[in-house]
Structures are given as C-alpha cells and as structure tokens.
Amino acid sequence: MTDRSRVGDSDAGLARVTVDLGALRENYRRICHAGTRTAAVVKADAYGLGAIRVVEAVGREGCRDFFVATEAEGIAVRAASRDSNIFVFSGPPDARSAASMVRHGLTPVLNDEQQLDRWREHRETPVAVHVDTGMHRLGFDRGTLAASMFEGFNVGLVISHLACADDPAHPMNQQQVDRFDAIRSLFPNALGSLANSAGALSGIGADMTRAGIALYGGNPFSTRPNPMLPVAALEARVVGLRTVAAGQPVGYGSTYTTRQATRIAVLGAGYADGIPRGLSQDARVALEGLRLPVVGRVSMDLLHVDASNVEGGIALGDWVEVFGRTVKIDETAAWAGTISYELLTRLGSRLQRFYTGQ
C-alpha cells in the first residue's frame, strides 16, 4: 500500500489510514468457515477502523450480530443497522442505561447479580449472560450460578471469554470449553458463544463465534502464522529531507548516531497519530516495497527514516507505509513491544481514513 499516487492524495494531510473493505469481507468469510454463526466485534470504533463502514461491509456478507463495549457504541451501530442484534459487553451500569438499551433495541450482556437486578424490570426483553470460566475478569461466578437466578428472564445467549486462545495448545482452552459446556446445561434454550477469532479458527465450537482482531487483519495466534489478509495501512508523507554527516545525532535524546553520511527522510506522523514512542530502532517502514530503517526516537508529529538506499531517491510528498502490505502490523507491534490490537485502537483522530474494495 505504498504507491506514490494514491486515493485521497490531494486532501489526506500528512498521514492517513487506508482500510481495504474487500480484504475485511474476505477475512469475515474465512472466519465464517470455521463456525456456524459469526458475529463481528466492532467495539472501539471497530478497532479504530470505523464501526459504521465495517458494519455495512460485513452486513453484505450476511452478518447480523455485532458486539460493542458500551451503550453509546451500541446506539451508534444501531443507527447504521436497523435489523441486527447488538450486544453490549459492559451491561447496564445503571437503571437509566438499562432503559436506554431497551429503547434502542440493544441486548446487554449481564456480568453480575447487580446488573441482573437492574434488568429485572425489563426481564421479558432478550438478554445475554456472561459467565466467568477462568479468566477472572467479568462474568458471573460459575461456582454460585444457578438456573433459578434467571427465572422469568429471556436469556437468548450465554457467553464466556477464552484467556489463551492465541496459543491453541494451551491446556486452559480445553478447561474453559469443559466448564462452558457444563454451564450451558443451565440455559437449554439459549445460544452459546465462547470462541473468539483464534478459538473459531482453531476449531473450538459454539453456536456463535465472535470475530475480532482476525477480522481486521491482525494475527489472532501467538504461535502460528497469520491466516488473515491485511486490512489497514498506515501511511505518512515525507515532509523533510536532509543528508546528515557521519557521527551526528538524530532526534530527541541523541539516541541514534549516524555511522556514515545518511539520507534522512522525516515523515509527518508520530505518537499523536498512534505510532508508539517506544518503537525500537529495529523497526522498518516501506516505500514501494523497499524496507527502510526507523532511526531516532518517534516524536509527537514526526518520525525519522534512513532512506539512503532508495534507488532513484526519495522525494518530498512521497507516501511511506508505516504498516500495511509490506510491513505487517504484527511486525510493527512486536518492534514496539505491544500487539496489533493496541496499534489499531490507538490510531489518532487527525488521521484521515480512506476506504477501498467496497
């Protein structure tokens, strides 16, 4: 995704994100092949890529189930998808929120007895129940769970979260599957949802799987190659060029010193745009498929690159890929000591987003 002439060149500012909706739809199809009914997780504005556009794209593939984190996210998605099921992970934090969810046709995921009580007034309206099977984050305690607690409630879905699905061989996966299967017997009329992206792709069954990071092109596995297509490309313009003599410092803190005369390209993106300040000096970016080393510290608005080996030179205004098709997002995340989820959700608000492959 590093062509010098690209969609939106004239109005994309200094940095941009291009989202390949065709690749996203293909990723959805790949996850669907691993499960019977596949929901799309579109919380955090679809991991930073634009929830409305993502909902519309996977809707064309038949997706009618969406998960968000908050009531506000659910209301935004409802405006774009009138006939879908929208599940709110956080549940109702208070009575006002519970009433609002009913009004907007949102389905809360109840996480504890306090939320269960808040929903009692609306108990005939469909609800989901979250049970903790070992992650110890949110969810009802499986040890104290009883069917009588939900008498009169319209429980349509029971969910739990896998803690170690990124490593399919981890013994906790089967432990959680067994616990979830036992819990399902308390809700004979409800669908079950346990498998996330990695769980679905590694064969963990459920009535409904939840496609998250794999949908957006990140590797859902920590121990396997990425089976998904890249979806997002972060690119920045070259805003400065200079030749720096050998033995000279580059950037804040003088953390990098040139070993020889070096052609430095300054890119118009930094940590305000979501590029981690701690991106290591092993990191690479790309110009037309050629990988270029990152040098010096990432600053708020700018990034230094060694462009000495670019045949034919590099020019002001050229677009350079920070991550995308040449430099994979999981590579960039590893250099920064983080994961692809964080890179996507940290993409800054001043980045313009362009959509292709609709």
Image: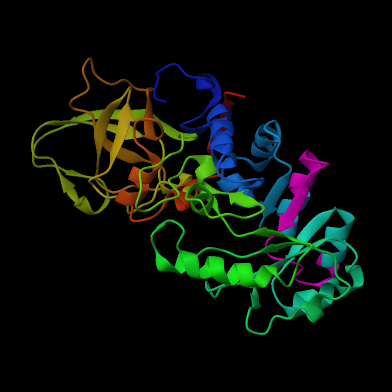
Displayed quadrant of residue 137? bottom right
Quarter in which the N terminus is drawn: top left
Q: Residue at x 70, y 40 (%)?
A: 63
Q: Position of residue 40 (x, y in %)?
A: 64, 46
Displayed quadrant of residue 171? bottom left
Q: Position of residue 162 (x, y in %)?
A: 52, 63
Q: How is the image coloured?
A: rainbow
> In the rendered view, would you say 49 is above or below 4?
below
Q: Residue at x 70, y 30 (%)?
A: 60
Q: Residue at x 76, y 74 (%)?
A: 115
Please state the total of marks drawn on the protein image: 0
Q: Position of residue 142 (x, y in %)?
A: 63, 78
Quarter in which the C terminus is drawn: top right
Magenta-colored stretch includes residue 78: yes
- Is 236 or 230 nearer to us in this picture? 230
Magenta-colored stretch includes residue 197: no
Q: Which residues are magenta?
A: 76-97
In the picture, measured across the screen, residue 256 lies left or right of residue 177, that is: left
Q: Position of residue 6 (x, y in %)?
A: 48, 19
Is residue 347 visible in this depiction of the protein? no
Is residue 183 visible in this depiction of the protein? yes
- Is 227 or 14 nearer to us in this picture? 227
In the picture, measured across the screen, residue 290 lies left or right of residue 344, that is: left
